[in-house]
Amino acid sequence: MTHIFRTPFYAALYAALGLLAIFSSPLTIARADTSIPPALLEEGHYQAILGDCAACHTAPGRPDYSGGLPFELPIGTIYSTNISPDPVHGIGRYSEAEFARAVRLGVRKDDSTLYPAMPYPSYARLSDADIHALYVYFQHGVAPQAIAPPENKIKWPLSMRWPLRVWRWLFAPSIRYAQQRTNSQFTDPTLARGAYLVEGPGHCGACHTPRGIALNEKAQTAQDGPLFLSGGGVVEQWVVPSLRQENRTGLGRWSEQDIVDFLRTGRARPGASFGGMTPVVIHSTYAFTDNDLHAIARYLRTLSPARPEAPWVYDPSTADALRRGDITQPGAQTYLDRCAACHRSDGAGYGTVFPPLAGNPVVMTDNPTSLIHIILAGETMHPLPTAPSAFTMPAFGDALSDKEVAELVSFIRHSWGNHSSSVSEDKVRRLRQQIAHPTVPPILPKN
Amino acid sequence: MTDHVTPPKKPDVLIIGAGWAGSIMAKELTEAGLHVTMLERGHDHSTAVEGAYPESIDELRGAIRKRLFQKLARTSLTIRNHPTQTALPYRQLAAFLPGEGVGGAGLHWSGCHFRTTEDELRLRSVTQERYGRNFIPDGMFLQDYGVSYQELEPFFDKAEKVFGTAGEASSVRGQATGGGNIFAPDRSDHFPLPPLADTFSASLFRKAATEVGFHPYSMPAANASQPYTNPYGCQMGPCNFCGYCSGYDCYLYSKASPNVNILPALRQDKRFTLITQAQVLEILLDDDRKTATGVRYIDLTTQSEQTMQADLVILSAFQLHNVHLMLTSGIGQPYDPVTQTGVIGRNFTYQTITSSRVWLPKTHFTNQFVGAGGGGVAIDDINHPGLDRGKAGFIGGSPIWVNQAGTKPINAALSSGGKGAPRWGHAYKTAMIDQYRHSLSIDAHGSNMAYRDVYLDLDPTWRNAYGQPMLRMTFTWKENDIRMNQYAVQHIGQIAKAMGATKIALNSLQHGQNFDSRLYQTTHLNGGVIMGENPKTSAVNRYLQSWDVSNLFVIGSSAFPQGLGYNPTGLVAALAYWSAYHIRHTYLRNPGPMVTA
C-alpha cells in the first residue's frame, strides 16, 4: 500500500510538500507491566495486524517495529520510523492521547505533521477502544528496540516539513467526521464492521482509490461516491484494480467466499494475489478472523460499479480453434507452448492452483501493465500457514521477445470472451526497461 | 545450510534423510510436539527454481546427466553377482538411481503408488499353509513382515490422502464398487482422486486384456488427476501427461513428492529444522551400545565434522544407505552368509522387471511422448493371492501393465527399433519414427525373493570419499524369480495378439542370466535392515524399532523381507505412518523396546 508513494510522480509532489517526520525526545518511559490483561494485549496485537503496521515499520533484517524500511524517491531516501516502545528511538514516551493523535490525525508528539505515507486519513476512524488496545500492545506487547532508523537522505529545502500541515488541513478528516461517515452507513452489524475494517484499519483506499493532484485519496468512504476503491494508479508497474462491483474489471463476479479465500490464503477460484497485494496478504489479511473476512467481503459486495461494463460471457471459439490445432492467431503458438499447461487452452486454469485467464479482471483492465509484468518477471503465491504451497509461475522475460510478449498478451486479452484491447510491442519494451529487477523470486520458495 | 538461523543445539529427534520416510516421520513427530531436526546430505530442491518450466524438462540435464540423483563421486557401492567374485564400484548410475537432496528418490520417482496384497506381508506363512514347507526352495529366506494388511490399512489410506493419489477402489468397507482391481483387498475409503484418464495405449491394453479374460484396472498414481489439497493444506496441480515424471521434479506440482506434499507444511512449523549438505557418517551410541545418543556428520558447506545429540534417532535414508549406516555404526550383527547368522545386510532384494514391446498398425498412434509416471492400466491376474503357485511353480507374482510414462527424445533415439534393428541411416530413422508413434511397451513388474547368498556387507577394499568402507552388493537373479517372470511374460504375448500387434518383441529373464548393473531396471531396492518377529532373523521389530538400540527406528524399503510385486513407495509410506503412530502412542509415553525379544 505505501508503495504508492514510491512512484516518481507522487514522490516529486511529496518532496514539494515536505518530508517524513521523526519522533523525538519523549519524556516518559514505558515499562513492562504484568498487570496488563493478556486478552487486551492479544486484542492490540490483532489491531496491529488489521492495520498492517508491520508492513512499513518492520523492515527486512531488522527487529520488529524498529522501522528503517527505505522509500526510494527521486529526491532522496526516507525511512520508516521506529514504533517500538524504546523511549529514545521509539514511542516509549508517548501518552495514549499523543499516540491516538499521531495515529488518527497525523500529528506527532512535538506537534509537527507526519508524512502521509502513514495512512492517518483512514486511521481517523479507529474507535477509542481499538486505539487503546493498540497503544497497550505497542507499549507492553512489543520489545523496545534501541536503534534508530537510518537518517533520511534529503536536502533542504525539500526537507522542510511545514507544507505537510497544509496538506493535512486540506485533506485529512476529523475523527468525528470520519467516524460518522463510516459508522452510519449500515444498520447490519456485519456490513458496518466490514465498512469499518475496509475504510479504517485496513486502509484499502490507500492503494485502491484514485488520488488527486495533491496525492489525496479522492474518496475516503463509500459515502463519498463511486470513486472510492474504484482502482488506483500503477504502483511499481502493477495496476491496482477496482474493488467495486464492475463485472469485467472489478469484483462483480467474485462471491463472498472468493474474497474471503483470497484474503486468507492469497488465492481464490477467480484469481490469485500478486504484486503489491501479496505483502498485505502475508503480513495482514491471512490472520484476520473468519468473521472479519466475511464482513469485509460482504461490505465490498455492496459497492456499486464505478462504470458500466457489459457482462463478461465465456466465448468458446478460442478453445475450439486451439483444439483443432488452429494456431493462426498471433500469440496462439506461444500460448500453447508456454501457458496452456497450467492455464489450459480454454483459459480456465485449475481452481486455486493455476488462476484462470478467462474472465480474470486483471487480464481485462484497460491498462495491461500487470499482465505484461507477470509474464516478464513471473510471480509466486507465497507460502502461508493457511496455504503452505508456494506455486510459482516462471519468468518468461528472457525467453520471449517484446513482439512475442505483445502478441501473447493481446491473444490472452482477446480470447475467451475477454474482448480487451491489443498491446503494442512498444508498451512491452518500455515496461521491460522499467522493471529493473525481476520481482520473482524475492525469497526462493522451497517447494 | 539450514532453514533456521540457529538450529536447536539438541533437538528431541534427529532424522537422517529427507525423502518420503524422513518427511513423514518429521511431520508426525512435530505434530506430537517434538523438536525435530532433519539432516540431508544433498542440497535443497525447489520446484520454483530447478523445476521451472521449460528448463526442468531438459532431458540431457535430467535423465541423461542425472540431475537429481546420487553423486557417485562421493559415495557409491561395489557390486558383484556371486560371493566368489571381487566386487567393483558402481561408477555410473544405470541399473538403479538413488536420489540425493531434499525429497530424495521421492522427488524423482514416477508416482506409481500401490498398497500390497494381503499375502505379501505374511508370505512365509501363506506359502507354508497352502503349498507346504517343502515348496520353499533351499536357500530362499522367505519371511513374514510381522504386520498385517488390516493393521496397515489406515496408514495406506492416510498416505494416499497425503499423496493425492488417483485411482479406482474395488471394495470399500465391504461394498464392491464394480470397478477397480477386483483382486485388491478391502479399503476403508476411496482414493482421494479419480483415476487418471487412459492413454490410447492403456485403453487398448484394457480392452485386449478384458477380451483375453484378465481383469484390468487403472493403476493407482500419485499424479494428481485434479487440483488437490491434502490434509496438510499442501496443494497439487493436475497432471497434463507431459511425460517428465521419472527423473524430474514436476513443474506442474502434480507428482507427489515430500517437497510438494509435506515439506511446505513442515517449513511453517518452528519445531522443524532442516539441515542440508549434512552427510551423516555414524549413529553414535552410549557405552552400553543400547542407546543412540546422536549422530556424527560432515557439514559439506564448511567441510567440518559435527556431532549432534538427540533423544530419538530416525534412520530414513535410501535403502542402501540405511544398511550402510547400520554397518558403519556397528548396530546389529552383520549378516554372514557362511554361518547364516546376523541380520544387517540380510534379505537384500530387488525387483524383477522386463519390458516387452508391441508394434501396432500405422493407423494407431500411441504417441510415446505422452504419459504420466504412475498412470496406466494393469492386471493382477499373475500377482493376486488366488493364483495357484503350486501349479505355476514359483513363489511371488508379477503385475503386468501398460504404464506409458512418456518416452523422451534422447531415450527414444537410443532405444529405437528393438533388438536387431539397424543403428544408423534411413532404416534406423524409419524404425525410430515407427516405434515412437505406433508402438507401446508392456511391463512384467514382479517380486524378487531373498536368498542366502544375496546380501549386503562392507567392501574389504573400496572406500568412499569420507574414508569409510563402501557397501558391497552381492546380487544375481535366481531360478524361482526367472520362472515367475517368464510365466508372466507368456501372458503378455496373449494380450499383445488381442491388441492387433503387427510385431511383438517379448522380453523376459533367461535361465542362468546374471544381474547386469549397466542396464536400468528399477530403483526398487529392498531389505538389509528387515522387520520381523524374531531378532535372529530381523534387524527391527514390527514397529521398525531396532532390536538392539531401542531409541533408533529404521524406516524405508530396507525393512521389506522380500521384494514386492508392486512398486515399493506405498508400503514405505504406510510403514512410516505405522511406525510414527506407535512412537506417538506407545514409545513416547514409555520409551524402551516396544516388543520383548
Image (cartoon, grey):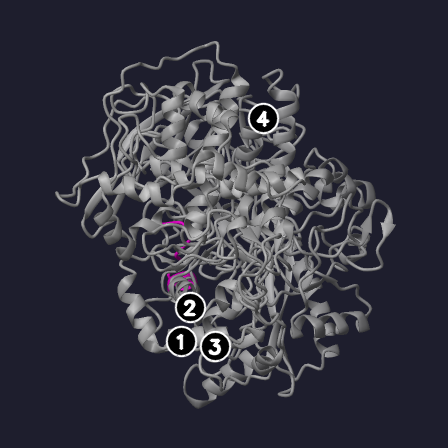
Check contact, mark 1 vs mark 2: CB within 8 A.
yes
Q: Which residues are magenta?
A: B61-72
Residue on which the image places disc 4? B32
**Dot 4: within a 10 Å radius of its alpha carbon, few (fewer than 14), some, or many (20 or more) residues?**
some
Chain at numbered mark 3: A
Numbered disc 2: secondary structure: loop
Q: Earlier in the sequence, mark 2 or mark 3?
A: 2
Real-space CA distance between mark 3 and mark 1, rounded to the nearest whole angstrom = 9 Å
The amino acid type, in three-letter code, at marker 4 is Ala
Numbered disc 3: secondary structure: helix
Check contact, mark 2 vs mark 3: CB within 8 A.
no
Mark 3 or 1: in front is 1
Real-space CA distance between mark 1 and mark 4, rounded to the nearest whole angstrom = 55 Å
The dot on residue A368 is 2
Have a look at marks 2 and 3 and say if they share a chain: yes
Residue A100: % across, % down: 41, 27
Q: Earlier in the sequence, mark 3 or mark 1?
A: 3
Residue A135: % across, % down: 43, 23
Mark 4 or 2: in front is 2
Residue A432: % across, % down: 30, 66
The dot on residue A411 is 3
Residue B107: % across, % down: 49, 51
Chain at numbered mark 2: A
Chain at numbered mark 1: A
